[in-house]
Amino acid sequence: MTERLSGLTTRIKEVAPECYGAAVRVDEVSFHQAVKLDEFDSSRILRLSPSQGEYQLSDVLPSAPPFRLFPTIERDSGGKLLMYLKLRCDLPPKSAAINLCASVPVPKGSVSMSLELSSPDQSAELKLQTRSIEWTIPRFPGGTQLSALFK
């Protein structure tokens, strides 16, 4: 087994990877068991003793996802619930989120739904088992906003 060294910047414990942009806080970083962290705090050096095959080196859990949801909920004159959702992607403009699925809870009595989505590649489905709407967005570019109206 060959030992490998890898150096990290001092920012690894403070911000998520650059794909999230600056100032995104990280709650937790965990490394694979093959990573020796003895020199990490003092020198930012990771010692790897990898076995054969492929494995995930680390997991980074950001404090908050790079999305913001702005809901507006009201009832129309017939008593139907109207949910207008705006979803903003705070990733840098050159980045994009892929295969995003937002789950939105609905009241118990909901049995059907009509919808209006801001782009044709999006989809949404009412899941009666979980009493939620699953809004699926295949590609969500950074710095943009999408909207949906659910009735």
Image (cartoon, rainbow, N blue to C red):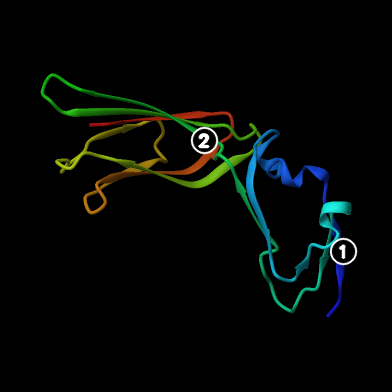
Determine the residue positioned at 68% across, 72% down.
54
Q: How crowded is mark 2: few (under 14 residues within 10 Å), some or many (20 or more)?
A: some
Q: Does residue 144 appear to the left or right of 126 in the view shown?
A: right
Label of residue 5 in the image:
1
Q: Quadrant of the C terminus?
A: top left
- In the image, which is nearer the foreground, mark 2 or mark 1? 1
Which percent across, then down, holds residue 150? 27, 33
Say what secondary structure mark 2 lies in: strand
Q: Earlier in the sequence, mark 2 or mark 1?
A: 1
Residue placed at 61% from the left, 35% from the top?
91
Q: What's the residue at 27%, 34% (across, down)?
A: 115
Towards the viewer: 32 or 56: 32
Residue type, label 2: Phe
Q: Which amino acid does label 1 sit on?
A: Leu
What residue is pinned by disc 2?
Answer: 67
Q: Distance between the residues labelled 2 and 1?
A: 35 Å
Using the image as rendered, state which of residue 14 and residue 88 is in the foreground.
14
Q: Quadrant of residue 10?
A: top right
